Amino acid sequence: MPLISPSILSADFARLGEEVRAVDEAGADWIHIDVMDGHFVPNITIGPAVVKALRPHTDKPFDVHLMISPVDAYLEQFADAGADIITVHPEAGPHVHRTVQTIKSLGKKAGVVFNPATPVDTLDYLIDMVDLVLVMSVNPGFGGQSFIDSQLKKVEAIRRRIDASCRDIYLEVDGGVDSRTAPLCIEAGADVLVAGSATFKGGPDRYADNIRTLRGDAA
């Protein structure tokens, strides 16, 4: 069974606390929080103050994806705000190895993100440190984009590396994940699915069914 991490990027921002509680009660495993700065990606979302404000609304792990550059200066702020997993892009700072070390020193799980054009070989020099690998199946910056099918080969390649490492590393896919693409991601080796639009469509009364659909279609 895949873990489901609803992306609040697709939630109603006027009632984020209620939305987080709703997807928690609907069966979400994690809460995925997309942080964008308008510089590294062409969109602006939220900062550590919002993460801190959301923290009392759920005990589920906060899966915080930092799409900001330079990223290092903000790691401690997001850790203090309540992030459980902090995921960064190799392109977001000059020394991603040091960035991952810093996240671990803050007592958080560390993840690394692969954009559609980021080479898989980058992982070879980080796999002994990371707790999560996130494959972007869209170009980051906006929700609601269509799934890039070529990224399934990347998921497969990373799955092989993780298995060969014998380490307990989550493999997550984010972007265009829905009832059609979820089973493809699982077949390729993913064990965590980030789903924004597919989770939040239809309003709170539909969230549990949406999550069950993702899990059922992916099983």
Image (tube, rainbow, N blue to C red):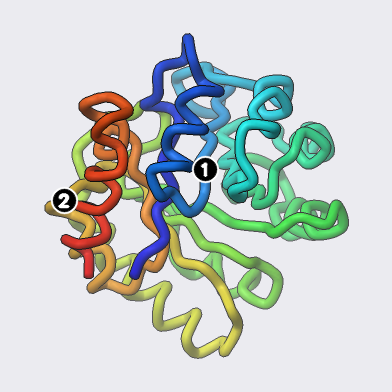
Image vertical order of residue 50 relative to residue 90, above or below: above
What residue would you read off at disc 2? 179
Residue at (76%, 51%) from the top-left corner?
99
Query: On the picture, is 195 further left or further right than 90?
Result: left
**Is residue 88 visible to the viewer in this orientation of the structure?**
no
Q: Nearer the viewer, residue 206 or 157?
A: 206
Residue 183: image location, x then y, percent: 19, 64
Q: Nearer the viewer, residue 139 or 163?
A: 163
Which sits earlier in the primary sequence, circle 2 or circle 1? 1
What residue would you read off at disc 1? 31
Residue 195: image location, x then y, percent: 34, 43
For the residue labelled by badge 1, is the local secondary structure a helix, a strand or a loop? Answer: strand
Q: Nearer the viewer, residue 40 or 75?
A: 75
For the residue labelled by badge 2, is the local secondary structure a helix, a strand or a loop? Answer: loop
Residue furthest toward the right?
A: 105
Image vertical order of residue 11 relative to residue 155, above or below: above
Image quarter (top left, top right, bottom left or bottom right) of the N terminus: bottom left
Residue furthest toward the top?
A: 14
